[in-house]
Image (spheres, rainbow, N blue to C red):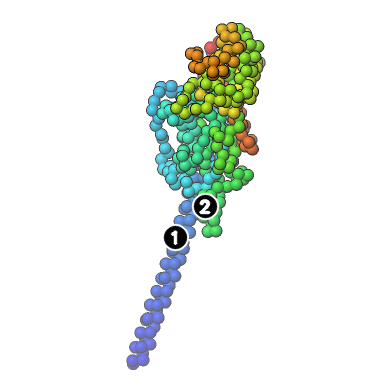
Amino acid sequence: MLNGISESGSDVVGSFISQLQALQNRVKELEAENSKLSSQISKCCCHKTEEMQNGSDVESFKQGVESQRKNTGGDKTRKKKTIERNPGYDLKIMTHHSKRYVALKVMYFGQRFYGFASEAQMDPTVESEIFNALEKTRLLVGDKKESQYSRCGRTDKGVSSVGQVIALFLRSNLKETDQNHKITGELFPEARIEGEIDYVRVLNRVLPSDIRTLGWSPVSIDFSARFSCLAREYKYFFWRGNLNLSAMENAGKKFLGEHDFRNFCKMDAANVHNYRRRITQFEISSSNMSFEGGQLCAIKVKGSAFLWHQVRCMVAVLFMIGQGLESVDVIDILLDIEKTLRKPQYAMAPETPLILQSCEFEDVKFICSSDSGQALRIHLENEGRAYQLQSAIFQ
């Protein structure tokens, strides 16, 4: 009888042990399944973010269109800057994603902007509009300082550009992984561009109509849009009228070479101590555009760097020479800082006809996909027709 009880107890214990092992195995299976589902959810979220980043999300595109309509309203009232951030967009989170250092080539029609830089605390600026677009498209990785942001030129209120260059860290479509197949957030070799985000297309979808990205280029992390620039070229458009172009061109040639241009700029003694700049090219050309018999001309000036309002001051003096109010020799007098100790009082040339034409760098080639290039051409053609209609109305 005792033997029967002992055998029965052993069976019960064995059954309990078997059930316990089965439960432990089931827990392990559930934990593995939970981990797998969590991984799938994470991948879905990343995929959704990539879609928005590439501009394929319909709602994001609609919001970009609505924002573009608001931005092109041309609000010219002065106001303090306000920073809008997209709901759920955390810059700190974005720093964990893959990134690369990129240079962007930008054009803008400067008439409605309070300059390019946003430090003046006045909106709208070109820079603030660009960063708004970078946030909307989820391309930023950190704030302006963390993104190692730099700009080539700091154009003033009303000045336009077709060749401005900025550089900063942006999100990348490429994935760099470690041994555990986790995204490392590391940088990518500059040469890798296949499969990368079409930065031109993504940004141009949300930028206002008077700002466009023309191209992008991968650059090394020691690149600076300001200090790596080899040369900057400006153009200043004007109507010929009765100006003596020959005298203006002869006078402009005197700018060539390295000179002290303190009498051809707005003094900024707090930040500038060296007023010597080198001008490498100067020319005046006529275009095939005319208006009621008046011919459109352009002054082209190229140099390594320029002082604050330097080009507009140079043009103002050239206009006085073209009008016969000053002789060609006035350029030599103003460039001689020993004879002319202080800058004479004269009005600068207007800002609207001035354009930052190009910024030159070594081994930087900007990329624009064929689709983005086609969309850009269509946009510019439409903008040109709109301005032609305005011109016809004025006529």
Residue at 52% from the left image edge and 27% from the top image edge: 274
User: Can see residue 290?
Assistant: no
Relative placement, left or right, of 145 versus 329 is left
In terms of depth relative to the viewer, which is nearer, 97 or 395? Answer: 97
Residue type, label 1: Asn
The residue singled out by tag 2 in the image is 184
Residue at 36% from the left image edge and 91% from the top image edge: 3
Residue 103: x and y in percent read 56, 37
The residue singled out by tag 1 in the image is 34
Against 85, is 126 above or below?
above
In terms of depth relative to the viewer, which is nearer, 379 or 304? Answer: 304
Q: Quadrant of residue 389?
A: top right
Q: Residues within 10 Å of mark 1 (few under 14, many from 20)?
A: few
Residue 129: x and y in percent read 47, 31
Residue type, label 2: Thr
User: Can see residue 131?
Assistant: yes
In terms of depth relative to the viewer, which is nearer, 123 or 348? Answer: 348
- In which quadrant is the N terminus drawn? bottom left
Residue 46: x and y in percent read 49, 48
Label disc, if present, on residue 231 of the rendered structure: none
Residue at 46% from the left image edge and 38% from the top image edge: 144
